[in-house]
Image (cartoon, rainbow, N blue to C red):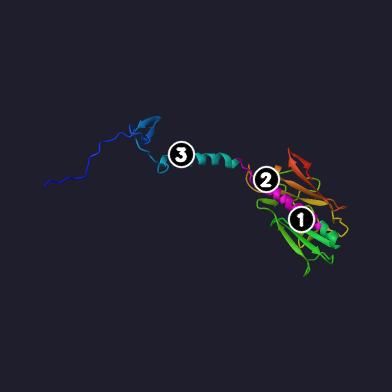
Amino acid sequence: MRIESDFKVRPAVDPLAAGEPAAPRVERWSGGVAVPGAGPVGRGGFSLIEITVVVVLMGALFAIAIPRIDFAKPGINAAVQQASLTLLSANRMAIQRQHNVVVAFDTAQSIIRIHADANNDGVMDAGELVRQVKLEDGVRFGLGGASARSIGPTAVTFTRTQGGLPAVTFSRGGTASEFGGFYLSSVGTPPNGNRPTDTRAFEVERAIGRFERFFYANSLWTREW
């Protein structure tokens, strides 16, 4: 009995000769030289040496940059705006409500206190509005190494007081109880704090109750506002 099989062996076909597209050639680059026939090589991350170099470089940059960053300037500028708005609000409130408004200065706590003195007796009675404004961190009342202006050398130069604190009173006519003012300066260690150039002076005019603002530079006071 003869057994026949349908199985036939097909000859190998060259894909290029048959017109079929060839598989793409893969090369791996090593040191700028292509290595033919090498498969793709992936990276699983950074080596310990690479990470260490990056950390060291970042540390060096921070060491150079941090001493040059002026942390005090934004604080003193914000405190100047706080104090300016407080004085303006107190003066306006006295005129609008037609009674005295007392602004007192707590130099120990770096606080400005506003008291709406409805009965004009100078005492904080029950029911009368009292509000406190805390100065920005790193800012205090004082000259901070700058020379004094004509208002005097103390942190707050008003001679009248309320509750033991130096204070100025704005009347319903818009006038102030006396001519005087105060200084604001930064707190810290040079070069980022406690510099005379950070100091600001506020001077309140008695006749009109308005204030002027000064900054200190090159050993001179210059009107700012």
Whether 75 is among the magenta residues is yes
What secondary structure is found at the residue carrying circle 2?
A: helix
At horizontal 58% and vertical 40% (from top left) the residue drawn is 65
> Which residue does the numbered mark 2 point to in the structure image?
73
**Disc 2 residue crowd, few under 14, some 14–19, many 20+, Cα 10 Å:** some
Residue 170 screen position, x and y as percent: 83, 58
Q: Name which of mark 1 and mark 2 comes first in the sequence.
A: 2
Q: Looking at the image, which residue sits at the far front?
A: 1
Quick one: label 1 or label 3, which is nearer the N terminus?
Answer: 3
Q: Disc 1 to disc 3, how far (Cα)?
A: 52 Å
- Which residue occupies the foreground of this view, 168 or 87? 87
User: Where, quadrant-wise, is the C terminus in this rendering?
Assistant: top right
Magenta stretch holds residue 143:
no
Residue of label 1: 86
Q: Viewer-proximal residue, 59 or 4?
A: 4
Q: Report the span colored magenta.
A: 68-90
Q: Residue at x 71, y 42 (%)?
A: 197
> In the rendering, which numbered label is found on residue 53?
3
